[in-house]
Image (cartoon, grey):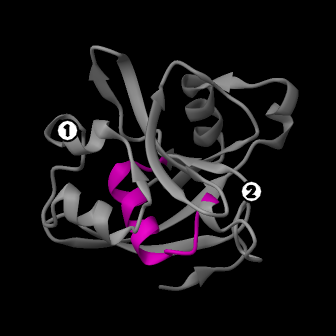
Amino acid sequence: MRERENSHDLGGYLVTVDYNRSLEDRIVAGKYNLVSDFFTKNAIHFPTARREGKKEILVTTLLFPSRRFNPFNSKKAIEELDKFGYQPAGLDELLALGEAYPLFGPAYRETATQPYYDIVALGSIFKGPEGKLVPYVKGSRWRRVLNVSSFERYWSSHFGFLVYQKEG
């Protein structure tokens, strides 16, 4: 894994997404202390890419600090990402990042490279009885959590978005 220089925010991370592995295997490899029942009991319903093989993808996390007092919803976040030439990453990329960088993520905020925000993957949306849901990673110094939140919510500056550059 190589860190990218000169990205729009904290830098980029080259991750390998292995589409052949099960969702359960990828969650275990990410070493999360707590995983929402949504992933363990409803894994078959959560969208992952319908691809085979492996692919290297350069992902980054984008922040919109001005949202501190003016949060916006997921649709607006996607529009803003589009302006920068990015598209939202999905669960596959989020899990690949978690596996490749076990010390990356909210659980390890004391490290120099650790962002101080939770990481949302707006590229995977599950439509269920609870409404539209998206995955995110959050945590503290002592734990790392894989969870879901409403797509309809308003995101504050406490959240960063996992993205990659649009192709073509």
Picture coordinates of residue 166 (x, y %)?
47, 52
Marked residue nearer the N-terminal end (1 or 2): 1
Residue tagged 2: 116
Residue 98 magenta-highlighted = yes
Task: Tell me, for residue 28, which label it has, or none.
Answer: none
**Amino acid under disc 1:** Lys
* Residue 133 found in image quarter: top left
Of residue 22 and residue 167, the one placed in the foreground of this image is 22
Picture coordinates of residue 159 (x, y %)?
66, 42
Around disc 2, counting alpha carbons within 10 Å, would you say few (fewer than 14), some (14 to 19), or many (20 or more)? some
Of residue 77 and residue 126, the one placed in the foreground of this image is 126
* Residue furthest front as drawn: 142
In the picture, measured across the screen, residue 85 lies left or right of residue 99, that is right
Q: Is mark 1 on a helix, strand or loop?
A: helix
Residue depicted at x 71% and y 74%: 113
145 is higher (above) or lower (below) than 60:
above
Magenta segment boundaries in residue numbering: 88-106
**Amino acid under disc 2:** Tyr
Residue depicted at x 48% and y 30%: 149
Residue tagged 1: 41
Residue 11 magenta-highlighted = no
Residue depicted at x 32% and y 71%: 29
Q: Distance between the residues labelled 1 and 2?
A: 30 Å
Q: Point out the frontmost of discs 1 and 2.
A: 1
In the picture, measured across the screen, residue 68 lies left or right of residue 76, that is right
* Quadrant of the snapshot with the C terminus: bottom left
7 is higher (above) or lower (below) than 72:
below
Picture coordinates of residue 112 (x, y %)?
77, 77
In the picture, measured across the screen, residue 105 lies left or right of residue 121, that is right
Q: What element carries label 2?
A: loop
In the picture, measured across the screen, residue 54 lies left or right of residue 130, that is left
* Residue 140 found in image quarter: bottom right
